[in-house]
Amino acid sequence: MKIAIVVFPGSNCDRDISWAIKNISGKKPDYLWHKERNFTNYDLIILPGGFSYGDYLRCGAIGSQSPIMNEIKKRSKKGTKIIGICNGFQILTESKLLPGSLLQNENLKFICKKIFLKVKNNNTFFSKKYKLNEIINVPIAHMEGRYFCNQETLKQLESNEQIIFQYCNDNGNINDFNNPNGSIMNIAGIVNLKGNVLGMMPHPERCSEEILGGENGIRFFRSIFESIN
């Protein structure tokens, strides 16, 4: 199992994810600098959270033009598993590896807190260790996390079961009141049609051990490791 974490100027969750992966799997991932064009094959490539290029122009916009992204697009077509968390999700949408876009939060404020997610689809590489409709508690930390897409895209996401996580309350109720950022249909995480590229705003690496206040992220990573092995 070979895992790589892409590091952009402004990334700040790369070490967190590396620690979580090593702590859970015992394997240390490699770091790939954003200027890399040629690198070995990896089973999993992760785009971490942070503020790539200072979020200038638009969150993820400049990161999506990094030299490494051309190669990641090629790898995704070949079936390599790709994960984008928070800023990584923004980069994936800007790169057109995932549909839709991430807009400024509805309240125009940076949100940093724990929220509840409902597992909408557990039949994926990234969610198989969760139960269908399970409620999990995961941290978020973003200013531009409001997922948006047009109605045609939304229908495709629904019909193809590409919506993986939705914001909810502790009882699993999905409505505007339990939507922290105004995302359409409370969407917190989606996959591409092929199912090998995932983007999500919540941070599973920040709830991967009890000392951090929760372990709901462990099964996220174990789902992936099991899929790879």
Image: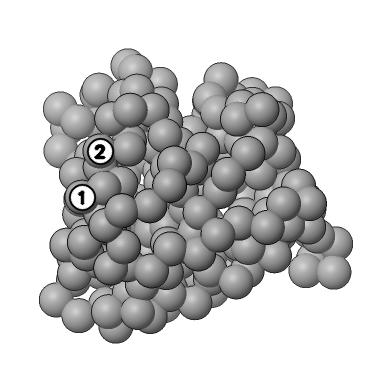
Q: Position of residue 13 (x, y in %)?
A: 53, 71
Residue appearing at x 38%, y 69% in the figure: 33
- Reading the image, the residue beneath label 1 is 70
Q: Is residue 178 above or below residue 140?
A: above
Report, in whole angstroms, how far the alpha carbon at label 1 lies from the one at label 2.
7 Å
Q: Is residue 222 visible?
A: yes
Q: Is residue 225 above or below residue 20?
A: above
Amino acid type at image mark 2: Lys
Residue 162: which quarter of the image?
top left
Residue appearing at x 60%, y 56% in the figure: 29
Residue appearing at x 85%, y 62% in the figure: 210
What is the secondary structure assignment of the residue under circle 1?
Answer: helix
Using residue 2 as the reference point, say whether residue 92 is left or right of it.
left
Q: Position of residue 218 (x, y in %)?
A: 74, 47
Quadrant, the N terminus:
top right
Q: Is residue 92 above or below residue 53?
A: above
Using residue 176 as the reference point, say whether residue 35 is left or right of it.
left
Determine the residue located farthest toward the top in the rendered image: 159
What is the secondary structure assignment of the residue under circle 2?
Answer: helix
Quadrant, the C terminus:
top right
Q: Mark 1 Cα within 10 Å, few/some/many (few <14, many 20+)? A: some
Q: Is the C-beta separation of discs 1 and 2 under 8 Å?
A: yes
Using residue 176 as the reference point, say whether residue 174 is left or right of it.
right
Q: Is residue 138 visible?
A: no
Q: Nearer the viewer, residue 162 or 88?
A: 88
Q: Nearer the viewer, residue 128 or 5?
A: 5
Q: Nearer the viewer, residue 23 or 33?
A: 33
Residue 28: which quarter of the image?
bottom right
Amino acid type at image mark 1: Asn
Question: Looking at the rendered structure, which numbered label has been put on residue 74?
Answer: 2
